[in-house]
């Protein structure tokens, strides 16, 4: 039995009617696309931060219990954050520093929104060590701030690098004051 010209010779400009085979081809491509999306979505979704990481994206710290001259360490995004309630002498020394000779010049007012509280990420900018100077009796370096014993970086009372191999100052994390006694970090 011979087929009609419409199905035998579509090159002559005749239109071929859609058949079962065309339906199966389109349906196969559609299912393959859905299957690829179903496989790809979990792989892409796992790149999102974990719930425990998102929970630590912002932390609130009550600084009213920190005595003048005392420092505390809190954890934010897996890093130590130093919060120091600075004395009037520490603030005065930080403001009196001539920043023109510093490796990473920054005014103290640019680093501390409220001069009495200094908030810093407690990670040395040289190789990522945690500097000393938070606890009473710890070595605070030549400038009475923080000292990284691993390679000898000295930071002043504003967290600025003054001596040693660290290339930049201790980082000031994004933070704001929700009230006179509560700081939100992050």
Image (tube, grey):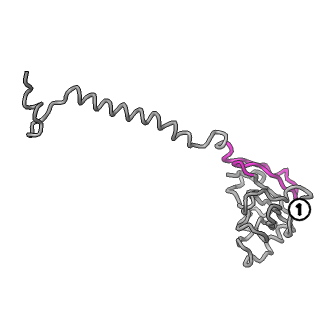
Report the residue marked by disc 1.
139
Relative side of 32 to 112, left or right: left
Residue in the picture at 64% in, 39% down: 51
Q: Is residue 99 above or below residue 53?
A: below
- Give percent across and percent down for residue 17: 15, 30
User: Looking at the rendering, in which quadrant would you find the N terminus?
Assistant: top left
- Give percent across and percent down for residue 179: 74, 52
Helix, strand or loop at label 1? It is: loop
- Quadrant of residue 16 in the image? top left
- Quadrant of residue 30 in the image? top left
Other-residue count near label 1 (Cα within 10 Å), few / some / many at <14 / 14–19 / ≥20: some
| Residue found farthest to the top | 1
Q: Is residue 110 above or below residue 120?
A: below
Relative side of 56 to 35, left or right: right
The magenta span reads 55-79
- Give percent across and percent down for residue 3: 9, 26
Q: Is residue 54 above or below residue 73?
A: above
Q: Is residue 7 above or below residue 90?
A: above
- Give percent across and percent down for residue 23: 25, 28
Residue in the picture at 92% in, 58% down: 137
Q: How many marks?
A: 1
| Residue found farthest to the right | 137
Taking depth in this image into account, of 99 and 114 the one nearest to the observer is 99
Q: Is residue 68 inside the magenta stretch?
A: yes
Taking depth in this image into account, of 56 and 66 the one nearest to the observer is 56
Q: Is residue 176 inside the magenta stretch?
A: no
- Quadrant of residue 180 in the image? bottom right
Residue in the picture at 74% in, 75% down: 102
């Amino acid at each position: 039995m011979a087929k009609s010209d419409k199905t035998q010779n579509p090159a002559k400009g005749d239109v071929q009617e859609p058949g079962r085979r065309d339906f199966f081809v389109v349906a196969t491509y559609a299912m393959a696309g859905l299957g690829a999306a179903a496989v790809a979505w979990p792989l892409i979704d796992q790149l999102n931060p974990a719930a425990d990481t998102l929970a630590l994206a912002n932390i609130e710290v009550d600084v009213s219990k920190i005595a003048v001259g005392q420092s505390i360490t809190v954890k934010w995004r897996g890093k130590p954050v130093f919060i120091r309630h600075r004395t009037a002498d520490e603030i005065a020394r930080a403001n009196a520093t001539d920043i023109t000779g510093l490796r990473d010049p920054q005014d103290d007012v640019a680093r501390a929104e409220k001069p009495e509280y200094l908030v810093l990420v407690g990670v040395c900018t040289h190789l990522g060590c945690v500097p000393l100077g938070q606890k009473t009796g710890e070595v605070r370096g030549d400038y009475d701030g923080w000292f990284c014993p691993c390679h000898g970086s000295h930071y002043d009372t504003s967290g600025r690098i003054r001596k040693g191999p660290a290339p930049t100052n201790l980082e000031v994390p994004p933070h704001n004051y929700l009230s006179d006694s509560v700081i939100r970090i992050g």
